[in-house]
């Protein structure tokens, strides 16, 4: 189950964070997303070590913790997408697919002329679209 | 094979170097032993890796052992093949012989026998005992050695070398080394090959039933061990890795039999992942394989041992972390079998062991920095993993309230499932529920109330009770079996503490454990949470064998100590790594501990770091969690500045993060502090709270020197109204770096409402330029604040922490000085002198309001303003004015066509008038009456010498000064020149001398003004000596009056006069030396054009206009009929004049008639003056002087002047004049100008140069 998706701006500021947990505990997911920026920073700053190629947007698994997994995605404008899931077995292809759709939703959202670049994304239709993408995650079907 | 495990294990611990056997044939070892052993360990040995690449081993330890040694002799052949790696790697055959025959008969066959074993790598060392001086012996030794070589060397390989005991032979030792090395290499290769073959054979049977992992392990580890003792660590590591892979496959294979997992023994909770000798493998062997719990740890321990030997502690840490994670998962799979919380305890101890071990193996600064960072990161990970597990254990036993419910802890714990034992531990019989545990959050400052973050994945109460219910008979016995040991172990201690009343309960528990049927009965009542904690503590006590760990769980204080230690370890390590955020966040956890322990200084330091991290990247939700804590600590420490700024930060956070009530509490704190006595008042930055911007639309535009009122929008982020004691705003001039910012201030208290406020500030005059807003400063109470932030017109956005960019839009533009108004004269031609006249003044504002303007009028000398009349002002219409030939022009006055629109009468006060309001925007024309004074009488001139009246005489100036603008700050000064003139200019001439002695005097009047003049009447007052032809009638000859003279035209008036006797008349009349022409006239003119009827007449319409009188005086001269003096030019000397020659010119002056009374008072002297063109003449002598001439008729005198002509030709000679005497009284001879001839100068020899 995806517990959280997030968009983080190029200055590491949160632009969008949506949790999908029942409980009122989004703050811990803020923490998880924020800390996972460390991993992204490390990967981006040490491309040699991590084998990150220049054009690869998908950063892969950021955190190999026991109980949840954090995946990252970096757009060419240095905007990061972060996905936190509690699923144990996640197929890489699913995550890639998720991010690709999420990215296009994001692009649509920020292309809104009323959106101020660098500000939080408040679009309701974006939120709806994201929750659709989240719901279909792992089902393998394209929506 | 499993039976050899114990032996294998003991061999591995005792055997640590290669063996080289020594076959001491000739009993020589004792002689050479020391020399041989000095070669050990071998330096820079070259061996082959498994892939047959040469590997250089710096130090290869080895041991020489005689073949007769018990260690080599006592082995069974089967043992040999199992532990082949410990067999000698080379055999040195030591021989000597002094006699050739002996060699052939005894030694050679023996040697052949020794070396026939192909398995062994051997070579022969021939020791020559021959003394170098003993030729015979030396020769014989050489011969034998040669023989030896022939017999044992092959083409491929030399197997002999020779050692001279008495002769130094350095080459021998090198030879020996290389031979030993060659043998070792060959042996190693062969054995590797052997093991490989064996392993391959076994691998082929992998999926067959006969497959036995133990055998495979045996071979694989033997090979690995062999590599290890040969110091081929890389190869050894690879073998272990392969072994691990193979094992995991075996374990995971679906066909594999159900095996015991292990981990049930006492002490198993302490991880042995770095200890190879924790448990003998023989104890963990199970059928054909090993117990997973022990064996995987063993394999990891082997790997790390080699990694440490390779000096790779980072890799140990990195592999270790992955191992712990994966092993923890494995433990989770078997959790129902394992003791309660075994998994957590194991992970904690594994992490700590790994940290300790890698740290001790790691030496600072020897690694590249990125590897070092990685190492610290791993250690941080290990610390935080153990920290999480430790917190979980603590929570279970009821220290949940000690754990800060922070996002980091919540993230770690709430997604970590509860332990899943097959059955939840039950309350021990002796338990007393002394712990009343409830999460009781500290009351936070400002009354902030938050729902605490969860630390538990689900309610522990439900989970624990559910686990009890899920008990099934199938697995209970296993658990009971394992638990029996610890329940028994703790039984003694428990019984000591147990009150007697609980005894029964305790025993019933024991019974319950043995009987599932009875167990059901205890399910009737669910456990309470405190019971769960006590039960968990009890169970944990059985699980945890590490006294240190148990101690740290024994009391909240100890827990906190350990918790702090682990957190700090994690934070410090993360700080050294790339993962700064992790470090800082954990610092926040440390701060929470400090906070709880009331160590506020340290708490503040750490909290500040966390806040800076969150604020810097705009994670407001997280910041809102920490910032109140920081504020609280700062308040306790009485750090007012910090506290204030924290309050301001709290206020500036996203509004949704706090309740209005809380935000109001923040504000009241700020206000309270601001109005209290601040010890060290510091400027407070409220950029995030109070933002400002100029109003939308174009900037305020001001003219130079104008003040203004600047309207600014200020956004207040305060939840309530806030009173600002003062407010000022700096303006920064764009495009001029040198100009400092100028502040404009509103000193009045301003009350800001929440949200948008518009504030108007008084703007003093600014220098020209365009300005943007700079900084907003002000005071709240005693507190000064600043704001640098600009809102962009929209609502103050909470997350515009990055939008500090300056707005480029100017708020104010001050123009360069430019003419704002123009004052011009409305009249184009001269006005009447000495008459009150209207002067028109066009006031033309140039895109600037003259409202309230004040005009100072200062007339110059000879000019005054007529007070009698009011000043008029009217709108000015340029198109009407420009129509000069407007047919509407009539007789001037009030019905002025241009005043159709607006008209006001003004009065002059103290030389100034105030402009009416309507004149502020439009062009207006101001009429004011003035009179130019000229006391001089007008003089007529003779038409013979026509003289124009000088314009300068009629010029008057009016100094004007207009003060205008908002506060009369603008002035405009101008001096207008107004031209005045008489209406006429009079010239006279005698038009005819009649034969009867009468004269016809023509008086010509020139109109000087642009107006129609009407002459109504004219009369002439004559001077003495003249008389009118018609005595008494002073009027002209003919009367055409009224005569209209249009502008700038002229008219003539004829008067008949005759000479009167000069002596006639009384004494009074003799004074009348001038004639005066009097003209009564009227004027019709337009004041827009120039001269017009005098002002005073306008006001009295009844009076006829033609009442103006103009007088002009002129002098008539009586004609001279007989001159009294004659001047004659005397003839020049003959021979003519030459240039440069002195010549005397003579005039004769003769009195023609006796002077009478006219000059009677004078003496008889006559003034003369010689005039000559100085270019032509040089005059010597007096040019001017008096000569005496008798008064008598006929007296004469000659005046002589010496002069030198300067140019040749016909030139005018000097002339003699008599200035005192009127020209008419002098006759001249020759009468007119004449010329004389001047010759060029004569040639002078002095100038000639002889040829």
Image (tube, rainbow, N blue to C red):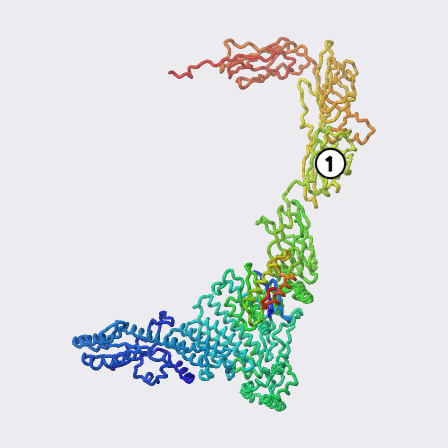
Residue B902 placement (x, y as % from top left): 77, 38
The residue identified by callout 1 is: B877
Residue B380 placement (x, y as % from top left): 51, 71
Q: Can residue A11 be seen in this view?
A: no
> Badge 1 sits on which subunit?
B
In the picture as drawn, the residue positioned furthest to the front comes out as B208
Tell whether B87 sits left or right of B264. Answer: left
- Which quarter of the figure is the N terminus of chain B placed in? bottom left
- Snapshot quadrant of residue B336: bottom right
Looking at the image, residue B927 lies above or below residue B224: above
Looking at the image, residue B13 lies above or below residue B947: below
- Snapshot quadrant of residue B895: top right
Looking at the image, residue B575 lies above or below residue A119: below
Residue B1201 placement (x, y as % from top left): 54, 14
Q: Which of B508 and B257 is in front in this view?
A: B257
Mark 1 closeness class: few <14, some 14–19, many ≥20 residues within 10 Å: some
What element does badge 1 sit on? loop
- Which quarter of the figure is the C terminus of chain B placed in? top left
Q: Is residue B43 visible?
A: yes
Tell whether B77 sits left or right of B809. Answer: left
Q: What is the tally of numbered marks visible in this picture?
A: 1
């Amino acid at each position: 189950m995806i517990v959280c998706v997030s968009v983080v701006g190029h200055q590491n500021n949160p632009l969008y964070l949506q949790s999908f947990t029942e409980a009122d505990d989004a703050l811990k997911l803020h923490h998880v997303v924020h800390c996972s920026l460390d991993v992204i920073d490390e990967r981006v700053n040490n491309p040699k070590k991590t084998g990150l190629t220049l054009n690869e947007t998908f950063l892969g698994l950021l955190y190999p913790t026991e109980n949840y997994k954090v995946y990252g995605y970096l757009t060419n404008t240095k905007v990061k997408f972060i996905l936190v899931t509690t699923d144990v077995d996640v197929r890489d292809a699913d995550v890639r697919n998720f991010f690709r759709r999420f990215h296009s939703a994001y692009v649509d959202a920020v292309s809104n002329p009323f959106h101020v670049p660098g500000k939080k994304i408040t679009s309701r239709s974006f939120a709806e679209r994201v929750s659709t993408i989240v719901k279909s995650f792992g089902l393998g079907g394209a929506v | 094979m499993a039976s050899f495990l114990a032996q294998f294990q003991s061999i591995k611990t005792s055997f640590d170097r290669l063996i080289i056997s020594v076959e001491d044939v000739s009993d020589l070892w004792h002689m050479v032993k020391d020399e041989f052993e000095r070669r050990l360990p071998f330096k820079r040995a070259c061996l082959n890796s498994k892939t047959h690449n040469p590997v250089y081993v710096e130090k290869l330890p080895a041991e020489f052992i005689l073949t007769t040694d018990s260690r080599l002799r006592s082995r069974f052949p089967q043992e040999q093949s199992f532990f082949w790696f410990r067999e000698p790697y080379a055999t040195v055959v030591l021989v000597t012989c002094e006699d050739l025959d002996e060699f052939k008969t005894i030694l050679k066959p023996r040697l052949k026998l020794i070396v026939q074993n192909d398995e062994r790598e051997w070579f022969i060392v021939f020791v020559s005992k021959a003394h170098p001086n003993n030729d015979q012996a030396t020769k014989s030794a050489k011969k034998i050695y040669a023989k030896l070589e022939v017999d044992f060397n092959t083409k491929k390989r030399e197997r002999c070398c020779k050692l001279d005991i008495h002769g130094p032979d350095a080459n021998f030792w090198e030879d020996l080394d290389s031979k030993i090395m060659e043998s070792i290499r060959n042996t190693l290769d062969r054995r590797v090959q052997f093991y490989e073959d064996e392993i391959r054979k076994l691998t082929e049977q992998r999926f067959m039933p006969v497959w036995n992992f133990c055998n495979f392990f045996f071979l694989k580890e033997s090979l690995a061990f062999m590599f290890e003792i040969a110091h081929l660590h890389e190869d050894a590591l690879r073998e272990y890795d392969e072994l691990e892979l193979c094992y995991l496959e075996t374990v995971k294979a679906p066909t594999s039999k159900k095996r015991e997992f292990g981990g049930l023994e006492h002490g198993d909770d302490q991880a042995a992942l770095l200890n190879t000798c924790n448990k003998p493998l023989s104890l963990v062997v199970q059928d054909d394989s090993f117990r997973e719990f022990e064996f995987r740890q063993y394999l990891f321990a082997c790997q790390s041992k080699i990694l440490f030997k390779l000096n790779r502690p980072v890799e140990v840490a990195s592999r270790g972390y992955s191992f712990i994670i994966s092993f923890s998962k494995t433990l989770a799979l078997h959790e129902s079998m394992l003791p309660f919380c075994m998994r957590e305890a194991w992970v904690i101890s594994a992490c700590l062991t790994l940290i300790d071990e890698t740290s001790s193996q790691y030496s600072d600064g020897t690694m590249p920095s990125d590897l070092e960072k990685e190492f610290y990161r791993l250690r941080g990970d290990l610390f935080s993993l153990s920290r999480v597990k430790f917190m979980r254990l603590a929570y279970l036993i009821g220290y949940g309230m000690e754990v800060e419910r922070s996002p980091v802890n919540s993230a770690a714990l709430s997604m970590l499932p509860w332990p899943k034992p097959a059955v939840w531990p039950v309350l021990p019989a002796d338990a007393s529920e002394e712990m009343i545990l409830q999460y009781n959050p500290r009351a936070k400052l400002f009354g902030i109330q938050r729902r605490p973050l969860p630390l538990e994945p689900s309610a522990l109460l439900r989970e624990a009770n559910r686990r009890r219910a899920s008990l099934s008979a199938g697995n209970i016995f296993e658990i009971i079996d394992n638990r029996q040991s610890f329940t028994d172990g703790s039984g003694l201690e428990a019984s000591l503490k147990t009150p007697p009343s609980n005894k029964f309960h305790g025993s019933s528990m024991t019974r319950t454990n043995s009987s599932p049927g009875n167990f059901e009965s205890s399910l009737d009542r669910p456990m309470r949470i405190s019971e769960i904690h006590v039960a968990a503590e009890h169970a944990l006590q059985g699980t945890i064998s590490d006294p240190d760990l148990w101690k740290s769980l024994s009391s909240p204080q100890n827990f906190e100590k350990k918790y702090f230690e682990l957190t700090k370890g994690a934070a410090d390590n993360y700080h050294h790594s790339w993962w700064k955020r992790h470090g800082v966040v954990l610092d926040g956890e440390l701060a929470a501990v400090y906070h709880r322990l009331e160590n506020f200084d340290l708490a503040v330091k750490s909290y500040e770091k966390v806040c800076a991290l969150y604020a810097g990247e705009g994670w407001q939700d997280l910041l809102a969690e920490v910032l109140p804590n920081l504020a609280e600590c700062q308040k306790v420490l009485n750090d007012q500045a910090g506290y204030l700024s924290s309050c301001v930060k709290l206020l500036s956070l996203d509004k949704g993060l706090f309740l209005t009530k809380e935000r109001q509490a923040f504000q009241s704190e700020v206000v309270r502090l601001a109005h209290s006595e601040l010890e060290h008042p510091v400027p407070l930055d409220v950029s995030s709270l109070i933002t400002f911007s100029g109003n939308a639309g174009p900037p305020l535009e001001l003219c130079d020197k104008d003040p203004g009122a600047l309207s600014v929008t200020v956004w207040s982020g305060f939840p309530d109204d806030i009173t600002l004691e003062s407010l000022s705003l700096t303006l920064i001039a764009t495009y001029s770096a040198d100009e400092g910012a100028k502040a404009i201030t509103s000193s009045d208290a301003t009350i800001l409402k929440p949200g948008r406020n518009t504030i108007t500030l008084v703007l003093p005059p600014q220098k020209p330029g365009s300005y943007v807003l700079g900084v907003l400063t002000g005071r709240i109470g005693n507190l000064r604040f600043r704001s640098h932030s600009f809102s962009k017109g929209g609502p103050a956005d909470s997350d515009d922490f990055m939008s500090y960019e300056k707005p480029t839009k100017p708020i104010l533009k001050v123009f360069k000085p430019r003419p704002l108004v123009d004052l011009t004269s409305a009249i184009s031609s001269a006005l009447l002198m000495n008459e009150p006249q209207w002067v028109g003044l066009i006031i033309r504002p140039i895109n600037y309001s003259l409202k309230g303007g004040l005009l100072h009028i200062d007339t110059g000398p000879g000019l005054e303003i007529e007070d009698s009349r009011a000043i008029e002002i009217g709108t000015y219409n340029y198109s009407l004015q420009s129509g000069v030939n407007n047919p509407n022009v009539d007789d001037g006055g009030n019905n002025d066509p241009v005043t159709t629109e607006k008209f006001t009468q003004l009065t002059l006060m103290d030389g100034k008038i105030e402009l009416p309001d309507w004149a502020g925007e439009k062009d207006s024309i101001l009429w004011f009456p003035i009179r130019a004074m000229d006391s001089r009488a007008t003089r007529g001139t003779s038409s013979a010498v026509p003289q124009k009246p000088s314009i300068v005489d009629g010029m008057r100036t009016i100094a004007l000064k207009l003060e205008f603008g908002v506060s009369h700050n603008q002035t405009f000064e101008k001096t207008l020149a107004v031209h005045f003139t008489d209406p006429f200019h009079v010239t006279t001439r005698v038009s005819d001398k009649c034969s009867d002695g009468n004269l016809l005097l023509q008086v010509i009047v020139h109109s000087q003004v642009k107006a129609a003049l009407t002459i109504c009447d004219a009369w002439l007052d004559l001077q003495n000596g003249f008389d009118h032809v018609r005595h008494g009638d002073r009027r002209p000859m003919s009367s055409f009056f009224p005569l209209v003279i249009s502008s700038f035209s002229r008219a003539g008036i004829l008067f008949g006069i005759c000479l009167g006797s000069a002596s006639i008349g009384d004494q009074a009349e003799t004074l009348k030396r001038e004639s005066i022409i009097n003209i009564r006239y009227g004027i019709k003119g337009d004041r827009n054009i120039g001269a017009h009827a005098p002002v005073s007449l306008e006001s009295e319409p009844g009076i006829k206009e033609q009442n103006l009188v103009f007088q002009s005086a002129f002098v008539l001269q009586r004609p001279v009929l007989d001159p009294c003096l004659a001047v004659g030019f005397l003839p020049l000397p003959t021979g003519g004049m030459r240039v440069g020659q002195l010549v005397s010119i003579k005039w004769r002056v003769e009195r023609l008639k006796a002077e009478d009374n006219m000059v009677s008072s004078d003496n008889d002297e006559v003034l003369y003056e010689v005039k000559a063109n100085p270019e032509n003449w040089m005059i010597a002598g007096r040019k001017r002087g008096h000569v005496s001439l008798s008064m008598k008729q006929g007296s004469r005198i000659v005046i002589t002047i010496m002069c030198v002509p300067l140019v040749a030709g016909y030139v005018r000679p000097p002339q003699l004049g008599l200035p005192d005497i009127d020209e008419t009284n002098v006759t001249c001879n020759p009468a007119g100008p004449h010329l004389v001839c001047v010759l060029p100068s004569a040639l002078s020899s002095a100038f000639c140069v002889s040829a």
